[in-house]
Amino acid sequence: MPERTDQSPEQHSPAAEPVTYDALVDTIICPECSVAVGVRCTTRSGKPAREPHGRRFEALEQAAGITAHRATVRSQKPDAWWSNGVDRDAEAALLAAYAARLDAHTRAAKEQTDGRASDPTDHPAEQPDPVDVALRVLLDQPTYAARLALAMADTLDQDPAGPITYLGREHVMDRAADTALGHLPDVVSEESTRALYAALPSLLGDITRGEYALQLRAVAKEL
């Protein structure tokens, strides 16, 4: 019989997979349907939703610090309306850091449950609960549909005296969607666009791009 040994072949850790919105969205309580962490979103009739609600993705961005990061970028470059404060590399890093905080929190909770956490100095300082942080600030932030309306208004304000037509409005919405919603999953972008379409001001009468921008800003407050 061959001799047994305690030595085992060296194991190599696989490369870490990129952190995605879809992988983390259920770590947040959904503000739309109020389902708990880890539970799939539901429709108004109580059935499982095909995709997570858009406001759940917004809450995730709040918890990860992405919303605050965008606000900082926009405050530093107020004239850069076209950027919408989107820095995909920075946002990916924030999302990864959020995932790491959740993982550390889960490990610490498991140690306490197993009775192994004897010295509080063995663990890093407790971080604010990302779910609580997200829900506290979510109501003060515009929805994605509102952000799309504001991005359209910013575009129209570049030529406030010019006329606005149906075709022109479609072109402006396409450009605004690329900057305001381009980083989001398709289902969230489509849901937000439909919500804005339902609330778009009328184009009847002689109206300038600047006047229509004012109406869009008013609509954004209601979305």
Image (cartoon, rainbow, N blue to C red):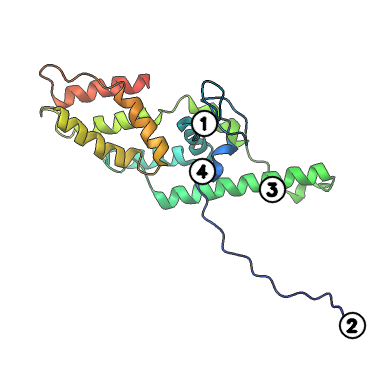
Residue named by callout 4: 22
Q: Position of residue 51 (x, y in %)?
A: 49, 35
The one of 21 and 118 positioned closer to us in this rendering: 21
Q: Three-letter amino acid code at disc 1?
A: Ala
Question: Where is mark 2, residue-wise?
Answer: 1
- Tell me the quarter of the picture where residue 140 sits: top left
First in sequence: mark 2 vs mark 4: 2
User: Spatial distance from mark 4 to mark 3, Cα to Cα?
Assistant: 27 Å
Residue for point 30% across, 30% down = 150
> In the rendered view, does 5 fall on the left or right side of 87?
right
Front position among marks 3 and 1: 1
2 or 1: tag closer to the N-terminus? 2
Relative to 164, is 38 above or below?
below
Q: Is residue 59 visible?
A: yes
Q: In the rendered structure, are the residues bearing label 1 and label 4 in contact, judged by CB atoms less than 8 Å apart?
A: no
The image position of residue 199, as x and y in percent, is 30, 20
Q: Is residue 166 left or right of residue 105?
A: left
Query: Can you tell which of label 2 and label 3 is closer to the viewer?
Result: 2
Q: What secondary structure is found at the residue carrying circle 2?
A: loop
Residue at image coords 31%, 41%: 179
Tag 4's secondary structure?
Answer: helix
Tag 3 secondary structure: loop
Q: CA distance from mark 1 to mark 4?
A: 14 Å
What residue is rendered at 61% in x and 33% in y?
39
Q: Residues within 10 Å of mark 3 (few under 14, many from 20)?
A: few
Farthest residue, direction top: 205
Q: Dot 3 corresponds to which residue?
A: 124
- Residue highlighted by disc 1: 49
- Mark with earlier residue (4, 3): 4
- Of the residues shown, which amino acid type is indicated by label 3? Pro
